[in-house]
Image (cartoon, rainbow, N blue to C red):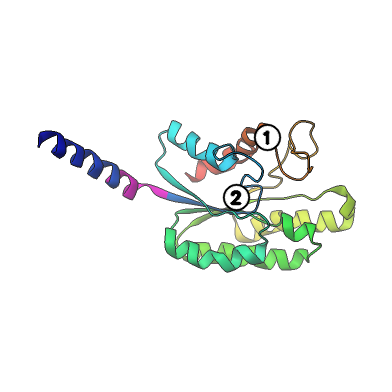
Amino acid sequence: MRGWLLGGALASLLWVQGALADTLLVVGDSISAAFGLETGQGWVALLERRLVERGLQYQVVNASISGDTSAGGLARLPALLANHHPQLVIIELGGNDGLRGQSPAQLQRNLAAMIDRSRTAGARVMLLGVQLPPNYGPRYNQTFARVYTSLAEEKQVPVVPFFLEGVGGVPGMMQPDGIHPAATAQVKMLDNVWPILEPLL
């Protein structure tokens, strides 16, 4: 009986700790969904472990889907906010918009709407910026990259201008498809995010 009571008390304590933990929601595409990697190798899984190591009580919800666009993320966001009630939302979207040659102006509108809806739900927001391969041309690439910095200024949200800094185009950091980061790149990606993320925690 005593063991049962102790076990029940421990389970109750763990439940309370989980209930008290803030929720960090990541809404992204294949880069954050760890496409092509084993479970637990992606930067979001590494972030979850770092939070535990630093004694920061966050429940990390990775709602990233390979192939998703900013329009898809915007459509999915209301249900995610309603289901998880996050205190912090990290948005990593836009790469697939760019690869499909979609309008940077539409990307900016979609991301702006995601920021507004997240804030209305009571969450802080952080943006992870994307840059495109050079074959898309300097004019389109520059306009695309400015979406993130412009939104950061307009909406006053923290931004990592180029999430894959030190990863994209670097030997050994990409999978054979040249699009998705390898396992060796995931710590670097987390380190790119951490200095901007840490003050929000």
Quarter location, residue 143: bottom right
Secondary structure character of the magenta stretch overall: helix
183 up-or-down from 117: above or below? above
Placement of the N terminus among the 4 image quadrants: top left
> For the residue labelled by badge 1, is the local secondary structure a helix, a strand or a loop?
helix
27 up-or-down from 112: above or below? above
Place of residue 160 in the rendered image (x, y in percent of width and height, measured from the top left): 66, 46
Q: Amino acid at mark 1?
A: Ala
Q: Amino acid at mark 2?
A: Pro
Quarter location, residue 54: top left
> For the residue labelled by badge 2, is the local secondary structure a helix, a strand or a loop?
loop
Q: Which mark is residue 185?
A: 1
Place of residue 187 in the rendered image (x, y in percent of width and height, measured from the top left): 62, 33
Place of residue 85 in the rendered image (x, y in percent of width and height, measured from the top left): 42, 59
Front tag of 1 and 2: 1
Q: CA distance from mark 1 to mark 2?
A: 22 Å
Query: In the rendered image, which residue does mark 2 sit on?
Result: 158
109 up-or-down from 30: above or below? below
Identify the mark nearer the N-term, 1 or 2: 2
Q: Which is more toward the observer, 154 or 30?
A: 30
User: Which residue does the image show at 65% across and 61% down from the upper left?
Assistant: 154
Q: Which is more toward the observer, 38 or 201?
A: 38
Q: Which is more toward the observer, 149 or 173?
A: 173
55 up-or-down from 147: above or below? above
Stretch in magenta? 16-22
